[in-house]
Image (cartoon, rainbow, N blue to C red):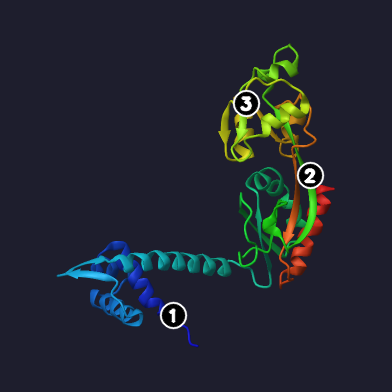
Amino acid sequence: MRRKIPSSTSLQAFDAAARHGNFARAAEELSLTEGAISRQIARLESLLNCKLFDRTGSRVKLNPVGARYAHHIRETLERLDRDTQYIMGMPEGSKNLDIAVLPTFSSRWLIPRLSGFKSMYPGITLNIAARTDPFILTGSGFDAVVHFEHPAWAGMRMRFLFQEKLVPVCHPALLTNKNARDQLNELPRIHRRQNPEAWHNYAQESEIVLDNPAQGVRYDLHEMAIAAALAGQGVALVPRMYVDKELSSGILVAPWPESEHLSKKFCLVKPRETGINEPALQDFEHWLLTEIG
């Protein structure tokens, strides 16, 4: 069955007219005549067999059907433009991988190491997107995901990468000469919003008394919590691998024990079926495992 897809000219005319609420301004934007815009809208309405605008004299206004259609068409045109720019920017003969990763893993671990990947595999362009929550990989447009274990990845191919373990860290200026275990109860606590029980569970595991484990500010990302700790705003419970550099340099300190149970398994998640990018994906997987050691 032949698809009912309007012409790109009609869709661009409709999108411009919907945004401006005026055929004349739409015509100016697209370097067309107002009559040409009107004809393209009429062709589109004929194809859809419904009106998209309410017309009062020379004025036009989207009706409810037109407003709904305009929303979807705008998203489609924007996505088509992004995809076109993406293909135009691909060097001839290059391989491209689109990888989704957790935001802090991307900024704190992956991106700082990518120069090594580019040196080893100059023919592979690695595109990184941040995804905080698990999602359905099939049909997402991503070649793979670096994320923690989750039921959303059921049926996918998974390769274990590392175990993320949390440790409290703070700016050294916050510490006094008193016992660090006792002082943890007095310092402001920094929470990650998605893991509100972390401090409570840490107190139970470490047997460090915290009068009110839930007290303190909340941030969405580990990256934000680390930034707050660097600014001397309190103690953040974060993965050690994200702050190794700061701990080594003394910018942050961690005089408290690392948690053994507050941890997550991180994996490289790949689609069930191999695709045309499988060789490049295998190279990326090999590099990841080598870097993690």
Few, some or many residues within 10 Å of mark 3 (<14, 14–19, 20+) = many
Q: Secondary structure at mark 3?
A: strand
- Residue 204 appears in view: yes
Identify the residue under disc 1: 5
Residue 163: which numbered mark, if any?
2
Instruction: Look at 81% across and 58% down and name the residue there.
Output: 286
Going by the image, does 241 lie left or right of 30? right
What residue is rendered at 79% in x and 62% in y? 283
Residue shown at 70%/16% (left/top)?
Answer: 183
Density class for disc 1 (Cα within 10 Å; few <14, some 14-19, many ≥20) is few
Question: Which mark is in front, 3 or 1?
Answer: 3
Q: Nearer the viewer, residue 84 or 154?
A: 154
Of the two numbered discs 2 and 3 on the same chain, state the one appearing first in sequence. Answer: 2
Compare marks 3 and 1 and give the one earlier in the sequence.
1
Disc 3 residue type? Arg
Indicate which disc, 1 or 2, sits on the residue closer to the N terminus.
1
> Which residue is labeled 3 in the image?
189
